[in-house]
Amino acid sequence: RTALGERDSMTEIVFELPDAKTPGFLRRSRQLAEYQDAVKQEGLGELAKFDLMVKFLSQFVKEPEDPQAVYEALMDATQEQINDLFALLTGKLNAVNPTNEGS
């Protein structure tokens, strides 16, 4: 579990990241590849790309449970937090709390 948020009025987002024992590895890998392919498509508008990113990230959010609250919390995340989350999902970053840089 990794949390984003906890600053000022931001809603905390709790992500439950899959590990090597979590079922559905190939499904998640396919979803990531679909997302990556979709954002590279010529003619796909920026809003559509944004919606795909939010949809992709939302599947890993455990708290808050309300979809609108998830959307708002993702909207309030920093670029660094989103980048760290993608790095965690792709295995390019150790699982630490991105809000406090592991401290």
Image (cartoon, grey):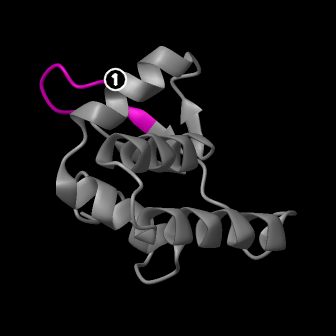
Q: Is residue 98 visible?
A: no
Q: Residues within 10 Å of mark 1 (few under 14, many from 20)?
A: few
Q: In this picture, is 64 found above or below 96?
A: above
Relative to 6, is 20 on the left or the right?
Answer: right
* Mark 1 element type: helix
Query: What x and y, as percent, mark residue 7?
Result: 16, 32
Q: Which residue is mark 1?
A: 72
Residue that sits furthest to the bottom in the current view? 92
Residue beneath the point at 43% across and 84% down: 92
Residue beneath the point at 70% across and 73% down: 29
Quadrant of the rendered image containing residue 55: top right
Query: What x and y, as percent, mark residue 75?
Result: 28, 33
Magenta-span inclusion, residue 48: no
Query: What x and y, as percent, mark residue 89?
Result: 53, 68
The total of numbered circles placed on residues is 1
Residue that sits furthest to the left in the current view? 8
Q: Which residues fall within the magenta stretch?
A: 6-13
Residue that sits furthest to the front in the current view? 43
Quadrant of the rendered image containing residue 20: bottom right
Quadrant of the rendered image containing residue 17: bottom right
Residue beneath the point at 52% across and 76% down: 90
Most common SS among magenta residues? loop
Residue beneath the point at 40% across and 45% down: 3
Relative to 92, is 99 on the left or the right?
Answer: left
Q: Amino acid at mark 1?
A: Glu
